[in-house]
Amino acid sequence: MMNFGKDAEPQQNLKKIWAIGGGKGGVGKSLVSANVAICLSLMGHKVVAVDLDLGGANLHTCLGLPIPQVTLSDYVSKKITNFEDLLVSTPIHNLKIISGAQDELGMANLKHMHKNQIIRKLHELDADYILFDLGAGTAFNTIDFFITADKGILVVLPEPTSIENTYRFIKSVFYRRLKMIEGVAEIEPLITESMNAKLSSGAQTSPADLMKKISELNPEVGLKIRQEMALMRPNLIINQVRSQADIDIGYSIQSICRKYFGIEMSFPGYLDYDQSVWQSVRKRKPLLIEYPNSKLVNNFDRIVTKLIES
Ligand SMILES: Nc1ncnc2c1ncn2[C@@H]1O[C@H](COP(=O)(O)OP(=O)(O)O)[C@@H](O)[C@H]1O
Ligand SMILES: [Mg+2]
């Protein structure tokens, strides 16, 4: 966990924070958040799932809940002053949620101060697992929620648009983290140059090249950066898989990230395309509870087991 703000709390007990992102809308972030949350709570863990898609909150739907009465915007607008009062119970034992804003203008552009306060409060919640269901895009808010988590999970569809968005997301995370590292101020122009280079340009401007260059110029900072980046090990989930070729996209994203970013990614598994997903959404019932025979039950089981182990 990265400390956010000087008075961020140290990590308590064995609480784990997992953030689910992906850079694109409609790829299955809420589906993954909801069902990973259900898996963990069925295993007996105390779980809080937080809807941080501040523009298009829909985690509650994937969990079969009506629109919650209290949301994060009530906290930002100070209608609710006690953060724990945002917790909403679900029919699933051990699982609570905090809902994102429904409509509130400006919520998607949370002020810096609010964001840091919310991050701190989220990290203080009493739970074994806290899941962040992130919004689409690479806005600083989304990236920062992702960075503060212990584990980052990226949901990707086997389509070029989703894959491109995933790289864009990883790139944003990479540079945001880089700039937070102490001592990088003096190499800022180098970072900016590399950051503005096109993903496809063949020149020596990839993040991996940048790290090499930094190490040559300033070995001490270079080492610090390498150590910091080694901690960053995002997890990839390919969703809506219909063939082996779709699954293999996961391995190619892994190898591209290694070459281009110098980042190792884990690939805990994939989710089959399955009718039961949209059927459960339409029925407003949680998938894993409503369709215990769905192919996705095994998919989720494997993914969650791998995530816990890693
Ligand atoms: N594995 C899947 N099989 C079939 N449909 C899926 C699957 N994953 C997602 N979907 C469809 O995509 C929709 C969007 O998923 P959602 O989790 O809301 O995306 P996000 O939170 O990323 O915007 C779901 O309502 C569902 O209809
Ligand atoms: Mg969503």
Image (cartoon, rainbow, N blue to C red):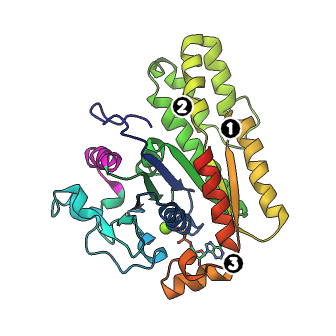
Where is 234 relative to 239, above or below?
above
The residue pinned by badge 3 equals 274
Relative to 60, 124 lies left or right = left
Could you tell me how far apart the alpha carbons at marks 2 and 3 are, in whole angstroms? 43 Å
Is 112 a magenta residue? yes
**In terms of sequence position, does the residue under pointer 2 or pointer 1 come before the other?**
2
Quadrant of residue 172 within the rendered picture:
top right
Q: Amino acid at mark 2?
A: Thr
Viewer-proximal residue among 154 and 139: 154
Residues in magenta, as a range: 109-124
Viewer-proximal residue among 52 and 286: 286
Query: Could one spot residue 114 in this view of the protein?
Result: yes
Q: Within 10 angstroms of label 1, few (less than 14), some, or many (20 or more) residues?
A: some
Disc 3 CB within 8 Å of nearest ligand 1 atom: yes
Looking at the image, which residue is at 79% across and 63% down? 246
Furthest-front residue in this view: 44
Q: Quadrant of ligand 1?
A: bottom right
**Secondary structure mostly taken by the magenta-highlighted segment of the chain:** helix
Is 20 a magenta residue? no
The residue pinned by badge 2 equals 192
Where is 206 relative to 71, above or below?
above
Q: Amino acid at mark 1?
A: Glu
Percent of width and height locating residue 6: 29, 30
